[in-house]
Image (cartoon, rainbow, N blue to C red):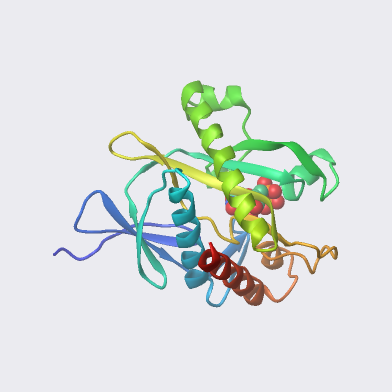
């Protein structure tokens, strides 16, 4: 048995190698960053919460026919995942207008987006993850038109599954970010994580714009009660998973 080697450390996770070259270990950290790491902090218990929420959502998606990199959960903060070649695109799926969309377009926060908006950003911290046009994406050879088509179709399917699930949890899935990768066999799979770090989640029925927020916007905008909001999302996800 060779000791695990740190392969990569990102803002929220550390990825280690394992004895099997096709399997990696993802360790979820409590560290939180926002605004391209200009704001840094710690959310107590976040690693464990996000690992657990991601585990349940990956299992749900797999059961609904969406291939993911998830293998199993081996510790409170750790999951084993398939080694993939990450597509350097962040896919943003938006059901309701919020965040950068509102800042950049003037659309009012809370506007229902029909049809769902799917956007692509260049996964490149140095450049600040800029929004891409389709043509720029092809120019940079980040994906072929066929690959992008498959990524969009899968993203919309994921949105359908997650929106329905969160709705049953009493949570509105406002928007979220996805990352995809290719396995050594060339299969496109969902990678990274799905958690309150990567989704905007609003407490259904709560109209107060500060009280309704159950995601990283509480950290980004210093709204307080960050840990308890993440904990509340976890509890609802667990309760709903048990019921279904
Ligand atoms: N998001 C993310 N990582 C990023 C950028 C965005 O997980 O690097 C998520 C974010 O939490 C939100 C959605 O993607 O759920 C849309 O984010 P937006 O483009 O509005 O950017 P923001 O306003 O968060 O800067």
Q: Measuring 28% from the left and 38% from the top, which residue is drawn there?
A: 184
Q: Is residue 187 left or right of residue 241?
A: left
Q: Is residue 32 above or below residue 123?
A: below
Residue 102: give x, y in percent of width and height: 79, 45
Q: Nearer the viewer, residue 201 or 224?
A: 201
Where residue 171 appears, as percent x and y from the top left, is: 69, 61
Picture residue at 65% right of the left edge, 77% below the top: 228
Left or right: 81 in relation to 102: left
- Figure quadrant of residue 18: bottom left
Q: Residue furthest front?
A: 243
Q: Which of the 4 image quarters holds residue 121?
A: top right
Name the residue nearer the viewer: 8 or 241: 241
Image: 120 above or below 111: above
For image coordinates 46% across by 52% down, the residue present is 192
Q: How many marks?
A: 0
Q: Position of residue 100 (x, y in %)?
A: 73, 46
């Amino acid at each position: 048995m060779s000791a695990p080697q740190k392969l990569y450390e990102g803002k929220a996770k550390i990825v280690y190698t394992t004895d099997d070259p096709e399997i990696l270990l993802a360790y979820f950290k409590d560290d939180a960053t926002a605004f391209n790491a200009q704001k840094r902090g710690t959310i107590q218990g976040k690693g464990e919460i996000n690992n657990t929420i991601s585990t349940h959502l990956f299992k749900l998606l797999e059961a609904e026919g969406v291939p993911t990199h998830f293998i199993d959960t081996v510790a409170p903060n750790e999951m084993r995942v398939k080694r993939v070649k990450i597509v350097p695109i962040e896919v943003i799926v938006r059901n309701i207008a919020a965040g950068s969309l509102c800042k950049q377009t003037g659309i009012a926060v809370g506007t229902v987006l029909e049809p769902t908006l799917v956007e692509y950003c260049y996964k490149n911290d140095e450049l600040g993850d800029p929004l891409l046009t389709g043509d720029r994406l092809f120019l940079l050879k980040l994906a072929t038109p066929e690959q992008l088509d498959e990524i969009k179709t899968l993203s919309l399917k994921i949105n359908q599954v997650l929106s329905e699930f969160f709705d049953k949890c009493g949570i509105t899935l406002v928007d979220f970010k996805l990352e995809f990768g290719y396995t050594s066999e060339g299969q496109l799979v969902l990678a990274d994580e799905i958690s309150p770090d990567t989704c905007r989640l609003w407490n259904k029925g709560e109209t107060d714009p500060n009280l309704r927020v159950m995601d990283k916007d509480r950290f980004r905008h210093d709204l307080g009660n960050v840990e308890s909001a993440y904990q509340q999302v976890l509890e609802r996800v667990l309760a709903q998973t048990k019921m279904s």
